[in-house]
Image (cartoon, rainbow, N blue to C red):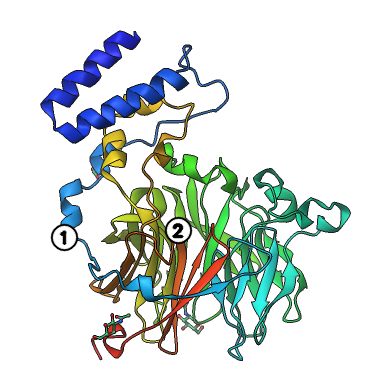
Amino acid sequence: MLKAIMTQGSDKASSTNCRSSIVIFISVVVLIFSWNPAMLCPHMDYDWSGWNASDLRPLAEMDAWPADPANKLVYARLHSVTDASGPESLAFDSNGGGPYTGVSDGRILFWNQGGWETFGVTSSVRQVTDVCNRKPVALKNEHICGRPLGLKFDAHGNLYIADAYFGLLVMSPKGGVAHPVSTQADGVAFKFTNDLDMDENGTVYFTDSSTRRPRRQCNLLIFEQERTGRLLKYEPSTQQTTVLAKDLYYPNGVAVAKDSTFLLVSLTSKSRIMKYWLKGPKAGSMEEFADVPGYPDNIHVTKEGDFWVALHSRRTQLQYFFANNLWLCKLLCGVPVHYIGQPAHSMVIKYNPAAEALDALEDRNHVTTKFLSYAGERDGVLWLSSVFCPEVWTMKLNKTNSNQQN
Ligand SMILES: *[C@@H]1O[C@H](CO)[C@@H](O)[C@H](O)[C@H]1NC(C)=O
Ligand SMILES: *[C@@H]1O[C@H](CO)[C@@H](O)[C@H](O)[C@H]1NC(C)=O
Ligand SMILES: *[C@@H]1O[C@H](CO)[C@@H](O)[C@H](O)[C@H]1NC(C)=O
């Protein structure tokens, strides 16, 4: 069996190029060390039903995508987050205070004149255990400590939080312990609440990235091309939660357009930004907005109505190869092959509402920034953060970087 597959592999290599041969060689080596003879992957309940290689844009198109050969993100300024890691997204309060950010031990921190302080926590049980005070908090304890991701203040100063494990939460303007306002929709519990934004009336739009896998298995959402994510709406005045769209591939960042006529949602594993219409003749329908050269995370709307998209990393040729050879993925399902060659290549792209890329900033060799999860503009400064690193970055934008239509 193994021999037959290896022969198939060599045939492919000879019919493609030299790079593919190297890929096959590495794959076979990994295979020999990781091959699960039963081919059943008993330790993981893989579901490959979402795979659709024909949906992947040809790698050659990457050249036409926005790029920044000057690597301007190299010049971003670093601000360490002390005693914590993974500030996934940032928010400012109505007085301009902050930024506020959720970190990997379940706390919400805020920047208070020269230092990070604790504003609140998302877990109500963290007092009865000390696992959340260990540094770093083990991934396996995330469901105890909480993992705050998307953040946004409403008009009354309440902080809405998308906690990966506890659902949609609200924290009072004084901070403290957040309480859940939505944990399920249509009878299906949230498994991986991820990001949120609000429209002009305070209606909350948020994502549940998967109904099967928790955040700690987020890499598998990409590996499997899992498609059970949902786009949701929470109406604070009626406390109703509505499913706007389901069966989505890893829905992640959400940003409501300045005029509230539509929202953008990133589908991380598909490298797509989708547009969901909130008003007008197309209300309730979804269409493609942009195709991005990596794994998109949070999206943030500027005062002028443009959108900054943060890419966690770029797609690579190796990932394209695996995507088109599902048989190899199945064989390798015991190892996280999607990580082979995953570069920390940082990139952010700014789009106008018509989906034209206005700007792109990169740090191809991750000299300064890496694994970006958030990019947001404020008073001519671009704020960046990372779901992995203990870091926040800022970068002064040129006049030409901001809205070019005006
Ligand atoms: C696979 O992707 C192609 C191209 O986007 C699409 O036309 C087709 O409907 C998809 N198939 C399934 C089963 O989703
Ligand atoms: C906000 O409320 C106003 C008044 O009820 C309404 O006209 C408008 O359509 C609402 N906006 C959205 C995005 O639903
Ligand atoms: C701003 O403009 C200067 C001079 O043209 C350039 O060197 C720099 O890279 C630009 N910065 C950004 C963030 O675009």
Image quadrant in which you'd find residue 235 = bottom right
| Circle 1 residues within 10 Å: few <14, some 14–19, many ≥20 | few
* Quarter of the N terminus within the rendering: top left
For the residue pair 176 and 247, the one nearer the viewer reads as 176
Quick one: label 2 or label 1, which is nearer the N terminus? Answer: 1
| Residue at the disc numbered 2 | 371
Q: What mark, if any, has residue 64 been given in the picture?
A: 1
Q: Residue at x 85, y 51 (%)?
A: 129
Can residue 205 be seen in the rendering of this structure? Answer: no
**Residue found at the very far left of the displayed protein:** 15
Image quadrant in which you'd find residue 405 = bottom left
Residue type (three-letter) at the residue carrying disc 1:
Ala
| Circle 2 residues within 10 Å: few <14, some 14–19, many ≥20 | many
When the figure is inspected, residue 402 is found, relative to residue 140, above or below; the finding is: below
Residue 48 location (% of width, % of height): 41, 31
Q: Would residue 215 appear left or right of 83 to someone viewing this image?
A: left
Q: Would residue 387 appear left or right of 9 to someone viewing this image?
A: right
* Quarter of the C terminus within the rendering: bottom left
Q: Are marks 2 and 1 in contact (CB under 8 Å)?
A: no
Please tell me whether mark 2 sits on a helix, a strand or a loop.
loop
Q: Residue at x 28, y 15 (%)?
A: 6
Residue 19 location (% of width, % of height): 20, 35
Disc 2 to disc 1, C-alpha distance: 23 Å
Residue 214 location (% of width, % of height): 59, 45
- Cβ of mark 2 under 8 A from ligand 3: no
Q: Would residue 137 appear left or right of 256 to someone viewing this image?
A: right
Please tell me whether mark 1 sits on a helix, a strand or a loop.
helix
Numbered circles on residues, count: 2
